[in-house]
Amino acid sequence: MHLQGAEPFLLPGGRHGVLLIHGFTGLPAELRLLGEHLNAQGFTVLAIRLAGHGTTVEDLSRMEHEDWMDSVRDGYAILSGACECVSAVGHSMGAVMAMLLSVEAELAHVVSLCAPVMIAPEQGVEHLPTREACTDRYVPKARRKLRDVPCGANNTYRRMPLVSIHEVMDVIAILCREIVRVTVPILIVHGARDHTADPKSADYLYENVRSRRREKFILPDAGHLLPLDAGVRELVFERTAAFLLEDAAQERTL
């Protein structure tokens, strides 16, 4: 059984593929509008579903972060087989995984949307019990219902397995250890009013990646849901497409 909106989607286009990676407890549908915008610009787009997502929270509780990375690797394998080059765009935890993918696979670019290198203080992650004490324990996950979004984009889990939050923290720790190996051209996008991923995360990434081409784009009135919030998402879509297209144009002139 899958929730509506959990279905991966492929939008055929040109020779440049873009892999879309949703965040923790998220769904591919959350990236549908972004995918359609990029496809209209000529990109082939594949949005994957991370293991344990879009089914049940019990499924999610059985997943380790390597299961999520395997989902990302599978998506990359599919897209790289169909396209000449591949870029990755990730939201939240998906952005962390996009950067980790760049360490082990050839990517043309990475776009990071609200990567949670640092968790916002109001999330209280410092009070997370030990991994052993988190087994079979769940906490509510509140998110406002969004309007003017694709079908299924509001079908996020309403509970989170505590043990899975440990897996999120593990994958963030891995990125921090590997950050100097991130050399891909990167666009770092963050909302200044993000109460999930501390906005200081954007500064950390910009200062620590080793990418020769890196850009930081801070939206002063935006929160965490950059791909979905009306009035914000349009700016994000345009900046993302411009970053990918500008780099491609530069490569053609070399």
Image (cartoon, rainbow, N blue to C red):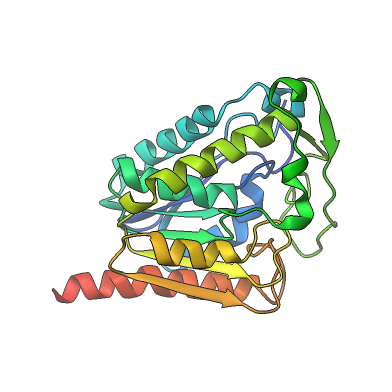
Q: Residue visible at 82% across and 30% down? A: 138
Left or right: where does residue 180 sit relative to residue 127?
A: left
Q: Residue visible at 61% across and 74% down? A: 234
Q: Nearer the viewer, residue 230 or 63?
A: 63
Residue 11 appears anywhere in the view: no
- Does residue 194 lie above or below 131 as drawn? below
- Does residue 220 lie above or below 49 as drawn? below
Coordinates of residue 103 in the picture (x, y in percent)? 33, 45
Coordinates of residue 8 in the picture (x, y in percent)? 57, 41
Left or right: where does residue 22 sit relative to residue 165?
A: left
- For the C terminus, give its image quadrant: bottom left
Residue 14 appears anywhere in the view: yes
Coordinates of residue 105 in the picture (x, y in percent)? 30, 42
- For the N terminus, give its image quadrant: top right
Q: Nearer the viewer, residue 134 or 96?
A: 134
Q: Residue visible at 53% across and 44% down? A: 172
